[in-house]
Image: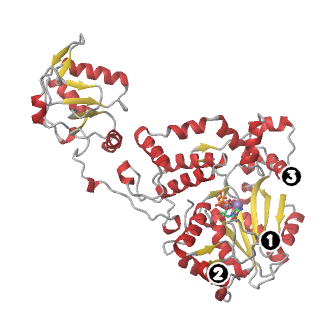
Amino acid sequence: MVPLKRRKLVPSHAGNTGTNLSGEKVPAKFPQVVLFLLERKMGASRRAFLSQLGRKKGFQVEEMLSKSVTHLISENNSGAEVRAWLDSQDQKPAHLLDISWYTESMREGHPVEILDRHKLQDQRINEAEVEVFSVPSYACQRRTTLDNHNTTLTDALSLLAENAELSDEEGRGVAFRRAAAVLKALPKPVTSMSQLRGLPCLGEHSLRVVKDILENGASSEAESTKQSGRYNALKALTGIFGVGAKTADRWIREGIRSLQQLQDSGQTLNRAQQAGLEHYDDINQPVTKAEADAIGEIVERAVVSVLPGAQMSLIGGFRRGKLTGHDVDFLITHPEEGREVGLMPKVVARLESQGFLLYQKTTRNSYLESNDGPARPASNIDRFERCFSIFKLAKEEKRGATQPETLTENGVQILQTKPARHKPWRAVRVDLVVSPISQFAFALLGWTGSKLFERELRRWAGHEKAMSLSSHALYDNKQISESDVGGGDICTSWFGVHPTVREERLTRLLSPYRRTKRSPI
Ligand code: CTP
Ligand code: MN
Ligand code: MN
């Protein structure tokens, strides 16, 4: 703000002028009051009308926010919203006032005394009063909660992350996921950009998205992505089980943008994609916890019938406490090392003979066969024996539960191509993994997710503890480089310990902040 003294020295015809109805400059009646009306939520035409009214009454009303503006007038905006907007303008008028002050002043014909009720909030923003958030930088160091206070922000960022992933831009996807996870961990809704100062993982791009939402209520980038033909085509095509970003991209380049166009194109589909297309609607409908539990009972019965004493755990999103998921994941083991060998084909054969599997593909355990051997995991992808399947589950009403109603993801309605057919069952994606008991703790931790949490846990282990973590083992890198024969497996001494105890210890070792029951990130 220009100091009063200096403004007084400015000749009235230069700065402190108003404009009469004929558009002529006239000396302002109240040279110490320079007004600016915020267009946001007021609208352009109302702002023009009110500005003209003020000028007619001898007030100086500026078109642009500048250093000389002393009073900012706003309608229907909260103080926090105006402050967020001002942050982007780098200007701080002395008074942030509600429209009521303006209309009363118009009525009186002079600037009325500023009362508390006129103030949007204390205009002398005390930096210390703004609650600045702070969170640790690795997701695995944070306590995450089921209460997300910033869903508008995280929905937009997750949508941009998803779009990046679907476009095969993994780096950008991870950056948006990290930013969303940080905002999800905050204890309160974000109201001002200044609260985010110093938070980790919020890059320039993510901050731009947040700012857009704080100022305008929505992210223009997220909104235009949501509307874009390419995003919608990618989402529709990758919604087919067995179709990844690369295949979808190839089809789109060949002019295929919808399921109908895919069917008409005569493209050759593999077995997984054929099954994916056939059960498209079911698979794209979220799985409920009740459905997961029902499938769990069926699979567990099959597991113990082919190998008595075998144990099964619910993993993935449902283990984290999510209420719905895109699939159901189970980890199977046996307390006696080695008894789990050959288990998967038997379980699959059993389920198949009972008519529960609409599709299945089993991949065997390649952990001991790989070139890099078990000593050091080369990538984050584990090599357990696993089965990707499509399960045939009797409809919920048959089991006395109700259907889910929410069909949204990142705030986007999940598309349904056809009206629900009246069939007494639904298709559900189910993943089965078998691990030997000696690796169970790592498998359980590694398959609980979320994907970002696992990635961060490994990054933390590597960067902060000089250890390599996978779903098979935890290695001390220093010991490995000394012997280079896998002698660094610091967990071999835990083999006699019950697996769940082992996982707890491992969890504690890796992340003192982690709670066992976490919400999805
Ligand atoms: N996972 C893995 N390797 C894969 C697939 C999954 O290690 N090829 C692990 C990941 O750690 C992931 C977990 O299995 O976190 C579950 O994966 P997924 O079912 O894809 O995700 P969820 O977190 O269960 O989410 P949703 O509820 O949507 O299924
Ligand atoms: Mn899952
Ligand atoms: Mn899965």
Figure quadrant of residue 48: top left
- Residue type at mark 2 is Ile
Q: Nearer the viewer, mark 2 or mark 3?
A: 2
Question: How far apart in space, not on screen, are marks 2 and 3 (Cα)?
Answer: 42 Å
Residue 49: in sight, yes or no? yes
Helix, strand or loop at mark 3: helix
Residue 320 visible in rendering: no
Residue linked to disc 2:
480
Mark 1 and mark 3: span between their CA atoms?
23 Å
Amino acid type, callout 3: Arg
| Label drawn at residue 271 | 3
Residue 197 shown left or right of residue 291 in the figure: left
Residue 344: x percent and y percent? Answer: 83, 71
Q: Which mark is residue 366?
A: 1
For the point 75% across and 54% down, which residue is it?
395
Q: Which mark is residue 135?
A: none
The amino acid sitting under disc 1 is Ser
Determine the residue positioned at 10% across, 30% down: 8
**Observer-nearest of 138 and 158:** 138
For disc 2, the neighbor class at 10 Å (few under 14, some 14 to 19, many from 20) is: some
SS for dot 2:
helix
